[in-house]
Image: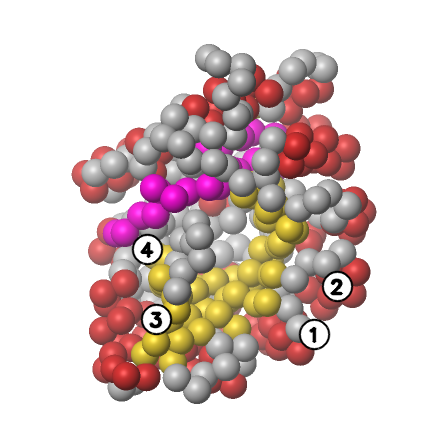
Amino acid sequence: MSTDHPILTDRFGREHTYLRISLTELCNLRCTYCMPAEGIPLSPRDHIMNYDEIYTLAELFVKHGVTKIRLTGGEPLVRKDVGTLIRNLAKLPVELALTTNGVNVDRFVDLFQECQIKKLNVSLDTLRRDRFQEITRRDHFDKVLENIHLLVDRGFNVKVNTVLIKDFNEDEIIDFIELTRNLAVSVRFIEFMPFNGNQWDKSKMVGLEAIMKQVEHRFRKEDILRIPDAKNDTTKNYRIRDHLGSFGIISTVTNPFCDSCNRLRLTANGRLKNCLFSATENDLLTPLRHGEDIEPIIQKAVMAKHRMRGGLSDQESFTDPEIHGRNRSMISIGG
């Protein structure tokens, strides 16, 4: 392997400039599509990256070309030292963003502004209180909605992540789009994806075609405006004329965006995943703690990245429960 080859560029020429770091496997919600009802076996505490290790790894990735870091979980805001982490990561020459379930956002809004965090993704899969409790197995609906409004009022760029599941919440597609009429958020409809323990079934998916069929039934065709997608964007973006906000569709399963993928993931226990759907992981934390050079490990992991969805390039392999069951549950990967 050439030593002068950029370590974050894979064999297909994709440059990985976006790193998602999971800060914790813990969460204050229990979303059905994210973790099994019985929970997951948590990594021992001493197997989780500490503050110094997260910063060291982040600094190394930034040195090699990462320009954006998104903090995820679990729920990142339940981590006790998250304030210190954010303040120090904000010193790196990188765009810092965060994905949250919104429950604790009001406690950190001032910190986000202090640290120039401008983009936050908030998970919200229903606009109905009873469904929220059914999905999350917790009763925090009002708090999450209040915190979304708080973020918008304070000038943040807010995306609302909505996982659609057939016969459960796809009847709320129009309700979510109506939310954008007077609220400057971007609602992103996400296809239900297969992970260990989330009872995924292809029949439960709601794809782009089904979403747009509802949109076109509700709104005039000339009022449905396509928004140009940003480079490396995972979303097909739209807005309704005269709405303050917008909406988008992330069709990871039916219409993957692998050709332009620039993402890597670092799990809370220090393992590098070169693809969300890959069951293969590379341990960075153990060699880091032993003082070893981890750059060759990173380069090898990036070079091993498949062209498409962790090697699951056809629908037969992708929908095989035995295969996708080898991957972690979403909560332990990092959202």
Q: Earlier in the sequence, mark 2 or mark 4?
A: 2
User: Of the residues under marks 3 and 2, which one precedes in the sequence?
Assistant: 2
Three-letter amino acid code at disc 1? Arg
Distance in Å between CA atoms under marks 4 and 3 = 16 Å
Camera sees residue 44 = no
Local crowd at mark 2 within 10 Å, few (<14), some, or many (≥20)? few
Please indicate, yes or no, whether residue 176 appears anywhere in the rendered image: yes
Residue under label 4 = 251
- Residue type highlighted by circle 3: Arg
Residue toward you, 3 or 253: 3
Image coordinates for residue 314, horizontal then vertical, percent: 21, 38
| Residue denoted by label 1 | 154
Range of residues picked out in magenta: 254-274
Nearer the camera: disc 3 or disc 1: 3
- Residue that carries the numbered disc 3 in the rendered image: 226
Q: CA distance from mark 2 to mark 1?
A: 9 Å
Q: Nearer the viewer, mark 4 or mark 3?
A: 3
**Marks 3, 2: nearer the viewer:** 3
**Pick the front one: 147 or 141:** 147
Q: CA distance from mark 1 to mark 4?
A: 30 Å
- Closer to the N terminus: mark 4 or mark 3? 3
Quick one: label 4, few (<14), some, or many (20+) residues within 10 Å? many
Give the residue at mark 2.
Answer: 113
